[in-house]
Image (cartoon, rainbow, N blue to C red):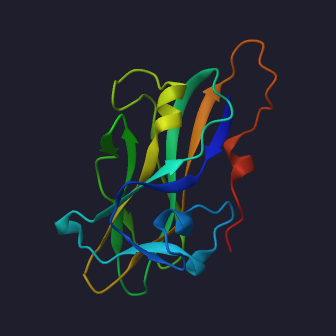
Amino acid sequence: MSTEILRPSANGSTIENTPSGEASNYACVDEASPDGDTTYVFSLAQTGGGGKKDTYTLTDSAIGTGTINSVTVFALCCHTPNATGSIKLVVRVNGVDYDNGSWIDVPTSVYTDYSYAWTVSPDTSAPWTWSEINALEAGLIAASATGTRRLRCTQVFIVVDYTEAAGSSQPSRSAHQFRLRRN
């Protein structure tokens, strides 16, 4: 199996969080090497209120062939000290948003990776297609435990796990080769 990382390339259909360090939300979370509190999006919305959602358009796949095994959304998030928060990870397929279902607790003020994998397209319940990947938006819903604390996200990307088409000569890379050292 091989993987490909796709990063945000523009703001998507829904932008509700507040940017910090850049004018556009996607520019706060698009870097290959996370920059922590230099650029991030944040939410003061409370979990009970549904949180604040951002979806981002992504770079197109350079692969385009083979069988897609899964699409995993990654978000590097933390919470301001002495607080807690939660996120849901989101994909937007064919104009409809799908989240991972349950809130994922973000209990720490240290940036930590959170992820969720979809093994089939949530829109069709069938295997992902490359056209869905190239039209995909991904992001998160962020919520704080209280309205005075910030849940922060400094990096969002997806990993497409796929099996190469027969006769393909593309280099094989495992997901861990793309992970970056966290400071």
Q: Position of residue 42 (x, y in %)?
A: 41, 74
Q: Is residue 61 left or right of residue 76?
A: right
Q: Residue at x 45, y 49 (%)?
A: 138
Q: Quadrant of residue 15?
A: bottom left
Vertical side of 60 occupied by 149: above or below: below
**Image quadrant occupied by the N terminus:** top right
Q: Is residue 38 left or right of residue 142?
A: right
Is 171 above or below relative to 177?
above
Please state if 57 lies on the left or on the right of 38 as rendered: left
* Quarter occupied by residue 27: bottom right
Q: Residue farthest to the left?
A: 48
In the image shown, does 102 or 55 lie closer to the viewer? 55
Q: Position of residue 8 (x, y in %)?
A: 55, 54
The spot of residue 47 in percent (x, y) is 23, 68
- Of residue 51 and residue 114, the one placed in the foreground of this image is 51
Residue found at the far top of this picture: 166
Q: Position of residue 114 (x, y in %)?
A: 48, 57
Q: Is residue 103 above or below residue 42?
A: above
- Count all numbered tags in the image, as a single digit: 0
